[in-house]
Image (cartoon, helix red, strand yellow):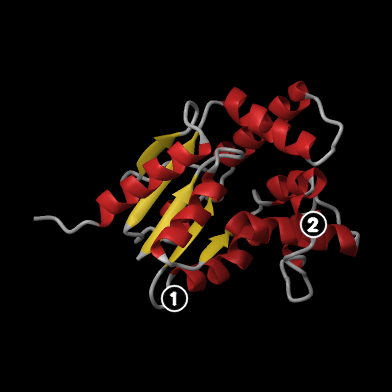
Amino acid sequence: MIIAVDGPAASGKGTIARALAAHFGLPHMDTGLLYRATALNLMELGGDPESEFAAARATDLSQIDFGDPQLKSEMVGGIASRISAYPKVRQALLERQKRFATQAGGAVLDGRDIGTVIAPEAEVKLFVTARPEIRARRRYAELKARGLDVHYADVLADIHARDERDCGRDAAPLVMAKDAVLLDTSDLDQDAAIAAAIHAAEGKRAPTS
């Protein structure tokens, strides 16, 4: 069984995908981490984020430590959001994601284009979203908890900017698959959102009579 979890930044899709993977006993891939790893690699190579060629060269992730805390930094996240619009970057990372999705037994993947590009054949597709203000509030709380000096207005502006890039790019834009289940987490706490996702997944995978 392949479970595709898509959605915009700070929607809670990563938390939901990890919970689904644990519930169904499936391996999980946070595909956004591949773009963050490429961004970190680009930074360490001294490459220009405005250069698609330089960003594509940085997709060789053989030397990247995926446990590096820098991958979760806002700077890396910002660069990742920008370079993810490059077709050459997306193509370079495409096969790695497809191989993970189609491994024996299935998998859970979360990202922006899982149900539309990476695994359009997925049995379960969820599109997790929330109002921009809610997502900004969650991201703000997360960053403050890490001890970072941030302002809500800046976080909200970044959320809007990421949404615009994700939805407006030519290569694999963020869009809800036609057969996906919409899960709006705006008014749900984490436990309720996870329960709703598991219920939706169980319903999609249940055999029809």
Residue located beneath label 1 in the image: 103
Residue farthest right in this picture: 46
Residue farthest front in this picture: 191
Residue located beneath label 2 in the image: 69
Q: Is residue 173 visible?
A: no
* Nearer to the camera, 67 or 100: 67
Q: Residue at x 72, y 31 (%)?
A: 140
- Image coordinates for residue 29, horizontal then vertical, percent: 55, 62
Q: Is residue 198 left or right of residue 111?
A: left
Q: Is residue 176 visible?
A: yes
Quadrant (top left/top right/bottom left/bottom right) for the C terminus: bottom left
Q: Which mark is residue 132?
A: none
Q: Is residue 52 left or right of residue 188?
A: right
**Amino acid type for the residue under numbered disc 2:** Pro
* Nearer to the camera, 61 or 145: 145
Give the mark nearest the N terminus, 2 or 1: 2
CA gap, disc 2 and disc 1 = 28 Å
